[in-house]
Image: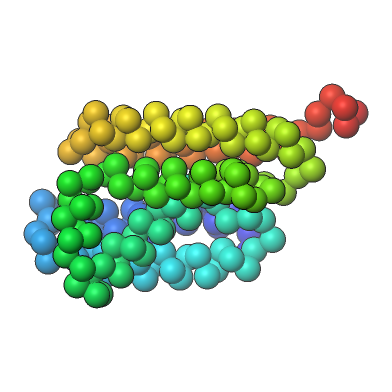
Amino acid sequence: MKTWFFALIQFLPLSSFASFAFWNGVPTNERWIQAFEFGAIAGVIQLIIVYFQPNPVNRLILGANLYLIVGGLAAFLQQWWLFKLYGSLQETAIFIFILCVGLITTFVTAAGFLPVQTTHKEKVKEYSYYLLVATLIALVCSLLFQGNRTWSVVVPIIVLALLQRFFSYKLRLPFPKDV
C-alpha cells in the first residue's frame, strides 16, 4: 500500500478511541469500556495490516496500539483493577507503553526506535536515544498537564511523531562517508 495512506491512518485507532469516548461530553464508565473495546479492535486490525509492509512497524503507533489492546483486553476480561490503574495514570499510560516499546526496540532490534531500514546502525542508535529522551519528556508533560488532553497527550504525541519523522528522514540522507 502507499506510504501516504499509512501516514494518514497511523493514529486512527487512538483518535477513534478518543472520539468515541468523548462523543457526547465527559465519558461514562460504560463508554470508556466500549471505547477501549473499539480501540483495541481497531488497533489489532491496523497492526495486522502494517505487519505485512516492508518497513518496520512505527514504534509510536505500536506503543499507542498496545495501550488500546491492553485496555480492550481488560474490558473484555473484566479486569477492572487495570481500568483503575489506567484511570489514575490517565494519558500518561500511553507514554508508558510508548516508552516501553522504545526501550525494547532501541536495545533489541536493528531498526531501533525508528521505523527505518538503514545500514547506519550507529546513527539509528543515536537517534533512538534522542527519541527516548523526547518520550521521557512527553511522559513528564503528560504528568504535569494531567487532565488537559491538549497538553498532556495531543501536543506531546504530535511532537514525538514529528521528531520521529525528522530522524527517519535524516537516516535516509547520505552520510559524509557514503558520498
Residue sitting farthest toward the top? 176
Tell me if I can see residue 27 in this picture: yes
- In the foreground, 165 or 120: 120
- In the foreground, 19 or 116: 116
- In the foreground, 19 or 67: 67
Tell me if I can see residue 167 in this picture: no
Residue positioned 11% across, 52% down in the render:
25
In this rendering, would 67 be left or right of 164?
Answer: left
Where residue 125 sits, quadrant-wise, is top right
Residue positioned 40% across, 59% down in the render:
66
**Position above or below: 166 against 58:** above
Residue positioned 75% across, 44% down in the render:
118
Residue 23 at what x, y percent from top left? 18, 57
Residue positioned 21% across, 68% down in the render:
79
What colour scheme was applied to this rendering of the protein? rainbow
Which quadrant of the rendered structure holds the N terminus? bottom right
Which quadrant of the rendered structure holds the C terminus? top right
Residue 155 at what x, y percent from top left? 35, 34
- In the foreground, 135 or 171: 135
Where residue 20 sits, quadrant-wise, is bottom left
